[in-house]
Amino acid sequence: MAPAPCLPGVDALKGLACVLIGWHHLAFYGPMSDVVHRAAPWLMNWLYTYGRMAKRCTAALNHPALAGARCSSLGW
């Protein structure tokens, strides 16, 4: 089976979304979240809103790749 073509734009979006999810988790589940919220509430609000959107973005971007891998392993 030939490897799938690489799509640099999609890969860049996946990488950016993964970094944003990491920042979102550090901002809300890390030990310093209260301190950062007092220092930069606008940043915390932005991470809360767009970090949650990034989770949906990675799910949507990875779904076709995961579905293709699963179908090929089943022989479809």
Image (cartoon, rainbow, N blue to C red):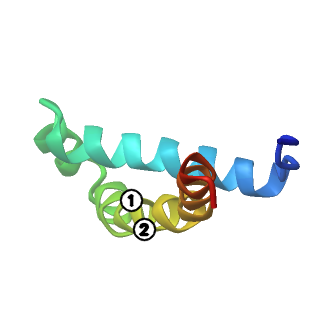
The Cα–Cα distance between marks 1 and 2, rounded to whole angstroms, is: 9 Å
Q: Quadrant of residue 9?
A: bottom right
Q: Give the residue at x 42% y 68%.
A: 56
Q: Secondary structure at mark 1?
A: helix
Q: Give the residue at x 19% y 47%.
A: 28
Q: Are circles 1 and 2 on residues that touch, CB within 8 Å?
A: no
Relative image position of residue 21 (x, y in whole percent) = 40, 48
Q: Give the residue at x 34% y 69%.
A: 49
Q: Quadrant of residue 10?
A: bottom right
Q: Quadrant of the C terminus?
A: bottom right
Disc 1 crowd rating (10 Å Cα; few below 14, some 14-19, many 20+) is many
Q: Nearer the viewer, residue 16 or 47?
A: 16
Residue named by callout 1:
51
Q: Secondary structure at mark 2?
A: helix
* Nearer-N-terminus badge (1/2): 1
Relative image position of residue 44 (x, y in whole percent) = 29, 56
Eye-nearest disc, 1 or 2: 2
Residue named by callout 2:
56
